[in-house]
Amino acid sequence: MFTMKSLLTAGVTATAFATATFAQDAPAGTDADAAYADLLWEVMVAARLAGDGMQLAFPYEGVVPHGMMLETFYTTATVDGYEGSLIVKRNYGPEGVSADEVLGDPQTYIGAYTVMFQREAGYDDENRDWFWVKYLPDGSLDKNPAGMRLAGRVGKGADAGCIACHAGAGDTMIFTTTATVPGLR
């Protein structure tokens, strides 16, 4: 099983993020969320989970709101000195795209990366401390129709969004088996 722990032991330091607080009710998309998402993206690229030269897995049929074809990676990562579980889902499209097309030219078909990173205890206890983020193919943050950056506690207290949807997955907030999620707590 691929693990980023062996690749990234020191993590990345962000002085801009160091002074941020973890208020449970803070909205998603804050400057601190965006800075943390930038750190996470750097870790993902270094581990070949995103960007040019990313490793490939066999794509499988997806569902809305993710892509029509997906690849999902379960690993651990160290971000800003903290090691946590990392789930990276690559979202491919458009509708009708085949696994062979995705494997032949993934950069053409990738629409987004949707990511869950389990942060340190106290980040968001109500939601198992998951940090949620949706990146565009170039690593920039996607935004909702109101212009909010999709990073942090996305959908907390709302009827839609990452947290609102994944709350239906049970205690772990993961729609797949927890046996494949390294470091899950």
Image: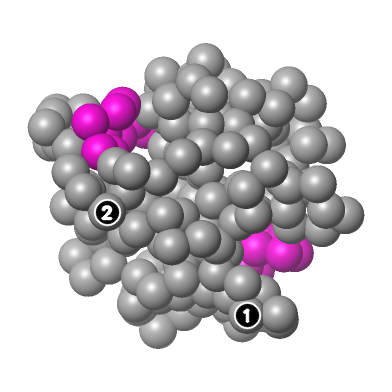
**Disc 2 element:** helix
Q: CA distance from mark 1 to mark 2?
A: 22 Å
Residue 20: % across, % down: 40, 45
Magenta segment, prevailing SS (helix, strand or loop): strand
Q: Which dot, 1 or 2, sits closer to the camera? A: 2
Question: Would you name the residue on which mark 2 appears?
Answer: 16
Q: Please, what is the three-letter code of the amino acid marked with disc 2?
A: Ala
Residue 168: % across, % down: 83, 37
Which is more toward the observer, 57 or 130? 130
In the picture, measured across the screen, residue 153 lies left or right of residue 59, that is right
Which is more toward the observer, 51 or 22? 22
Q: Please, what is the three-letter code of the amino acid marked with disc 1?
A: Gly
**Disc 1 element:** loop
Residue at the location (46% across, 40% down)? Answer: 21
Height in image: 84 above or below 163?
above
First to last magenta residue range: 59-83
Whether residue 53 is in magenta: the answer is no
Question: Would you name the residue on which mark 1 appears?
Answer: 147
Q: Is residue 76 visible in this depiction of the protein?
A: yes
Which quadrant of the rendered structure holds the N terminus?
Answer: top left
